[in-house]
Image (tube, helix red, strand yellow):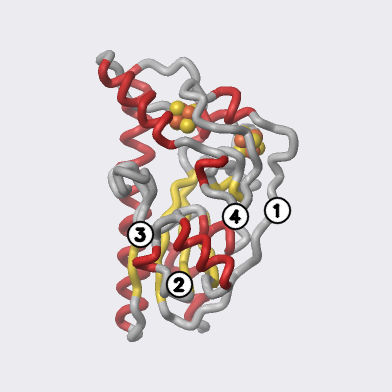
């Protein structure tokens, strides 16, 4: 069996919703990685990506949600789902390392971020985008045709000689700007993703964080998720 097929079977055996392989060697991809503040890990030629779809019923409760629902959502999405993705990354890294390759896991989640830039060590959207699993939407999230942005992603960077499983899907956001319109923090500009522009041309993460902090200062649950909820590509 080909190594890529074996890794995909592992991901499927652990009930991951998505699996893909992205090649990171193109100069424009390298520039994007460095521009995102990830120069420390920009030398890897390949990224594996796994994604786990969120509970649709739970995300659908977010508009008007009280603190108990918001805490239930936060716990399930980041701790329960995030824990499963992180465990999957550990398994994939173990397999690659035993075969003699370097393998570096990048888990998603609100705690694994640079606090000044509010960005992760490596963008969790980049690998699924390059692997053909979705496009980067006006919300700066990875939008899949089946589950929209309602997916938690994780990445393994590696030097294993694996081939890409797909190519980027062009944006299907069209005239939609539902994520920008619903955001209570006005954190989005409503611009389409353009890899040559900085993230701040589309999204100001500080405004999102300020909104969460303001809620906490008022004694409320500091979670939102409305941009995740509203995307028509994840709603049924
Ligand atoms: S989580 Fe809420 S506040 Fe933050 S960007 Fe999304 S809609 Fe705006
Ligand atoms: S809500 Fe609309 S504009 Fe925003 S990411 Fe989804 S499709 Fe794109």
Q: Say which quarter of the image contains residue 216.
A: top left
Circle nearer the N terminus (1, 2): 2
Mark 2 and mark 4 lie on one chain; the one further toward the N terminus is: 2
CA–CA distance in space, label 2 to label 4: 29 Å
Q: CA distance from mark 4 to mark 3?
A: 21 Å
- At label 2, counting other C-alpha atoms closer than 10 Å, the crowd grade (few under 14, some 14-19, many 20 or more) is some
Please provide percent x and percent y for residue 65: 42, 18
Q: Is residue 96 above or below residue 226?
A: below
Q: Which mark is residue 106?
A: 3
Q: Which mark is first along the chain, 3 or 4?
A: 3
Local packing at callout 3 (Cα closer than 10 Å; few below 14, some 14-19, many 20+) is many
Q: Which residue is mark 1?
A: 170
Please tell me how crowded label 4 is: few (under 14), some (14-19), or many (20+) other residues with Cα within 10 Å: few
Disc 3 or 1, which lies upstream in sequence?
3
The residue to which callout 2 is attached is 7
Q: Earlier in the sequence, mark 2 or mark 3?
A: 2
Query: Mark 4 vs ligand 2: CB under 8 Å?
Result: no
Label 1 residue near ligand 2, CB within 8 Å: no
Above or below, comparing residue 118 to residue 226 in the picture = below
Residue 70's disc is: none
Q: Is residue 225 in sight in this rendering?
A: no
3D distance between C-alphas at marks 4 and 1: 12 Å
Q: Residue 99: which quarter of the image?
A: bottom left
């Amino acid at each position: 069996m080909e190594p890529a097929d074996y890794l995909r079977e592992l991901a499927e055996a652990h009930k991951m919703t998505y699996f893909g392989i992205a090649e990171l060697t193109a100069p424009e991809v390298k520039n994007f990685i460095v521009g995102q503040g990830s120069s420390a890990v920009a030398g890897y030629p390949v990224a594996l990506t796994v994604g786990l779809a969120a509970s649709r019923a739970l995300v659908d409760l977010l508009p008007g949600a009280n603190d108990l629902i918001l805490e239930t959502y936060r716990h399930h999405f980041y701790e329960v789902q995030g824990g499963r993705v992180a465990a999957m990354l550990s398994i994939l890294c173990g397999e690659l390392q035993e075969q003699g390759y370097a393998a570096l896991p990048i888990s998603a989640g609100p705690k694994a971020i640079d606090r000044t830039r509010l960005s992760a060590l490596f963008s969790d959207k980049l690998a699924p985008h390059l692997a053909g699993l979705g496009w980067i939407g006006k919300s700066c999230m990875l939008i899949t045709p089946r589950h929209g942005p309602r997916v938690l992603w994780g990445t393994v960077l590696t030097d294993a000689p694996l081939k890409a499983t797909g190519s980027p899907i062009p944006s299907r956001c069209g005239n939609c700007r539902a994520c920008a319109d619903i955001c209570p923090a006005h954190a989005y500009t409503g611009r389409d993703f353009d890899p040559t522009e900085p993230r701040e041309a589309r999204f100001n993460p500080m405004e999102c964080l300020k909104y969460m902090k303001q809620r906490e200062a008022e004694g409320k649950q500091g979670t939102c998720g409305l941009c995740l909820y509203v995307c028509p590509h994840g709603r049924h």
